[in-house]
Image (cartoon, rainbow, N blue to C red):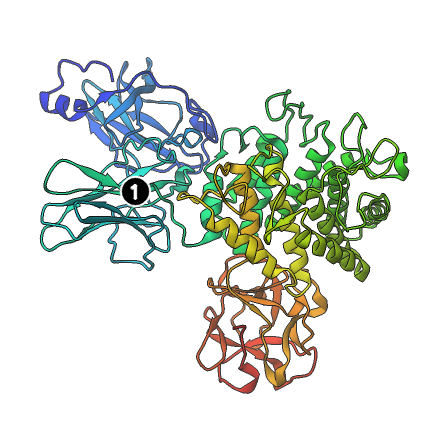
Amino acid sequence: MRALSGVVVLSMLASLCTAQPAAAATTVCAVYCDTRDPSLARQELFPVPEKVMNGRRIVLHVSNVDGMAWGSIDNGLLGDGIWLDRSWDGGATWDGLLGKATIPATWTGTRTLMYNLSDPTNHRRGAVRACGDAQGVTCTDWVYPTVCAPTCDNADPGTGSGNWRPVPDAWLNGRRFAVHFDDTGMAWGTVDNGRVGDEVWLDRSWDAGAGWPGGSSLGRTSIASGTSARTRKFNTSDPGQKLYGGVVRACGRAVEGQNGTCTSWARPATDHTAAAVDSLMWSYDPWTAYWQWSWWNSAVALTTVIDWMKQTGRRDYLWIVNHTFEVNRVAFPPGARSSDAIDGHFISRAVDDAAWWGLAWVRAYDLTGDATYLNEAVIIANYVAGFWDSTCGGGVWWNRERTYKNAVTNGLYIRLTASLHNRIAGDSAWLGKARTGWQWFTASGMINSSHLVNDGLTDTCVNNGQPVWTYNQGLAIGAAVELWRATGDAALLATARRLADAGTTSPALVTNGVLTEICDVPTPSCDDNGKQFKGIFMRYLADLNDVTGGAYLTFARTQADAVWSNRDSLNRLGQRWSGGPGNVRDWRTQASGLSTLLAAPSGRIGPITGLAGKCVDVSSSNTANGTPIQLWTCNGTGAQLWTVRGDGTIRALGKCMDVTYSGTANGTLIQLWECNGTAAQVWQPLADGTLRNPQSGRCLDATGVSSADGTRLQIWDCHAGGNQAWQLPA
């Protein structure tokens, strides 16, 4: 802040200068960099009142969509100025004079450029205000001094549901201090066994506990009477500022002495997959629009976040899908995204890296229905297909130099080409490539006599005997499952099951029931590539599990339990799922662990039976949106394996039981559809055995009171008759 004019009264000087401006500001880059032209703003809001001084209007403008703000001054005179202040500690200090502009001759107003509200790349939450110099200095209020997500900070801890304490309490002179979380992730602190005057508060950090500027002593309170007290509730994430993975701790002080204590830093852990994805998103860089320093691993991490959104129906992180796409589909020199140059369209000399991105954009298409992503996957698949030749009788090369034919690249190729066929109406070309690729792969010798997949082929086109990595095994399973979806060939599922049976039982990949990479033992030593391998295996094992009646659910739950039980207090998931000293944790191990949690969704799993003991069934095991849901003789297939989840959804084959077109009328049919979080997919089990859709107020009903195979299900006025009585999984 510059020196104030002599006409400024002392009271104003005191109010504006109780805190001191920080050192010169550094440029912040989030989705955009500081000093962006306000004409490019995608939104204009006025969240704080304007200030008027000497007839001049000082206004703060905000675009929440862009995460940026700018200031303006109107009704002014030549030389009047406008600027922004930005604080990283709640207004105690600030970077001043950002974008300062003065009114030129013949004008009566001007504006600053846009500046970021926060710095998610460096995990700093900011506050911004507009200030003007109009024969005196005045400033607006700071914008967004508290977090609202959507409940605002300082909420009553008596409201809401849930009371979770994920870390041990802290003790001081017999007092117990604890940090609590509700079901939405808001936190509060308590002190018990205390005396009048004892204090308790929360600290909140956006950088995993390294610092907590502006987040100290939140809700500080003391025991007024009795032996206990609690703070108000505060948020642990701020999606509006793209700040994820915030951490809190409860701290306190006993009335006697000056000593204090704090619990460990903690993140909410009520919902395991939500907690894991929150920690993963902490490492996403909005400026570079990927997870730093690992190119193909970022494609896998993005796919995992999309998997989470698909499975839960939530869209918390939808913005990163298009943002990652738009920022990264251009060319980059070596070292910018990978040690290799990126040619554009996510293509580089590493053919397998490109294919990982192709699969990511297939999943983005599945999530959004936006054909832009599917078209990008086609571009990538055409590039990969260009490396198929007759060497070793076929197969695609691992790299542009054509030095190696291996399992990962060919597993990716088959999965990608089959995926395109399953999403492009009338296709035959991609199906032909997928079939040819599978025939070559299974005959190449890379699958050994133990049904395990070795890494690749020698120069003489025989199995090179290199290690069996979990991701190669998983990709082979995933390739077979996707090609089965395209062809219905039961032999493909049989092969996938042999590969899965080997992968879940072989000592080469499993130790004491837990999936184990060779670089996990005796100490975790996997490189950045290997850290993600096991999660890839679990993604495709889960795919097979969905279509085989839950054949691998027990194994998946064992893995998920191991991963979760060995997390740290910030919900960071380790490389070695069995735990132990020296476990490595970073965003790659986080994405891998999250895939494992997703492979074992919580909820009751099994058949749903109705009239005459018939099962609720997905017609023909078809996973397409709009597939009828019907009654059918129970047969133990995945089409009759339903997961009844705590969020009210009922799921099979990776999709949700859905009321067609969100209808509410009697006779509206029930179908299978992508889980999307709408009320058309919410079902409430009632004590009389009915399943009620709250949106319509009607119940799941077998049409015509019929138990014949193929009887369609619908919604109808609830009457608790036999055709509305359902036995859910235990």
Per the image, the residue denoted by label 1 is: 249
- Give the side of residue 171 with respect to residue 693, left or right: left
Location of the N terminus by quadrant is top left
- Give the side of residue 271 with respect to residue 329, left or right: left
Query: What residue is drawn where x is 41% and y is 51%?
Result: 269
Query: What residue is drawn where x is 44% and y is 79%?
Result: 687
Residue 711 in the image, given as x and y percentages of width and height: 66, 79
Q: Is residue 241 visible?
A: yes
| Amino acid at circle 1 | Arg
Residue 397 in the image, given as x and y percentages of width and height: 80, 33
Residue 394 in the image, given as x and y percentages of width and height: 87, 39
**How packed is label 1: few (under 14 Cα within 10 Å), some, or many (20 or more)?**
many
- Give the side of residue 399 with respect to residue 186, left or right: right
Query: What residue is drawn where x is 10% and y is 50%?
Result: 224
Residue 718 in the image, given as x and y percentages of width and height: 48, 81
Query: What residue is drawn where x is 66% and y is 47%?
Result: 509
> Does 599 appear above or below 524?
below
Q: Nearer the viewer, residue 118 or 609?
A: 609
- The quarter of the picture where residue 57 lies is top left
- The quarter of the picture where residue 257 lies is top left
Q: Residue furthest front?
A: 522
Q: Nearer the viewer, residue 660 or 31?
A: 31
Q: Is residue 75 visible?
A: no
Helix, strand or loop under label 1: strand
> Does 425 appear above or below 147?
below
